[in-house]
Image: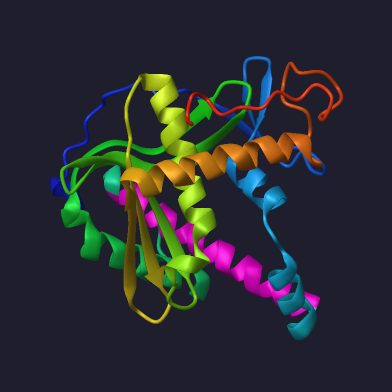
Amino acid sequence: MVNLIPVVKKYEYPSLQRKDLGWPEGRRYIYGDQKLPSVTTIISKTKDTEGLDAWAERIGKENAEKIKNDAAAVGTHMHNVIERMVAYRDLPRPTNWLMTKGYEMGYRLVNTYFSNINEIWGSEVSVYYSHKYAGTTDMIGLYKGKLAVIDFKQSKKPKKVEWIEDYFHQLAAYALAHDKLFDTEINFGVILVSVQDGTTQEFTTTGYEFENYKKAWLKRVDDFYAEGGLPAPNTGSNGNKNHTKIYFGIK
């Protein structure tokens, strides 16, 4: 049960202001004089959208937009359930089917996997890599006895591991930022998926595989600034000419 999991305040996580600045900047986290792109903004701007674009054309852009908006709403409600249960806060009564579905999917993840969580160090906490990116991780803590970054996802149908590379890059981004901020060594990532058909899935990454995801993420950040993304803070106005490659010591 979630109320048996120790919540351990290991670190003082930064308070970042989050703003959606619209095109072309996207979502930015404000920290001092830095406007840092979010992890999800970088992923969105560096992903191959050919398949999604073809799907939207096939079913119609209006239908595609509704499906995406409904999925986002369900995901938000699912995360709210988990966050409130971890914080021992009451849940508002569901007022529509999207809220009800999100609650069901959140409860399912808690009931299925939270017995594997030994300690919660942070829930919905912000982390950043100075002058590069920032984001909010669903959870940092001990999972099956190992320090892990944990992410909760919802899906209309079961996932295959080859479909979720972006999820692993997201974990890598949070792990790298956390390590930089607090001198930790997070080498374990966990993705917990609640599927609308009532099933759940657990995906994990560790060791050399996780290190490779970290390298791929850093390359992606590099590409974001070099190709169409805004220049990195404090690097000047021209993203290509003033861009400095960032691999942060990972070879």
Residue closest to the eye, 14 or 159: 159
Q: Residue at x 72, y 21 (%)?
A: 233
Read off the magenta span: 61-85
Figure quadrant of the N terminus: bottom left
Closest to the observer: 94 or 171? 171
Rendering coords of residue 56 (x, y %): 75, 76
Q: Residue furthest front?
A: 251
Foreground residue among 95 and 107: 107
Snapshot quadrant of residue 188: top left
- At horizontal 32% and vertical 22% (from top left) the residue drawn is 11
Examine the residues drawn in magenta and state their main secondary structure: helix
Residue 1 visible, this orientation: no
Point 55% across, 42% down: residue: 217
Whether residue 166 is situated above or below residue 103 in the rendered picture: above
Say if 8 sits above or below 94 in the image: above
Q: Is residue 187 magenta?
A: no
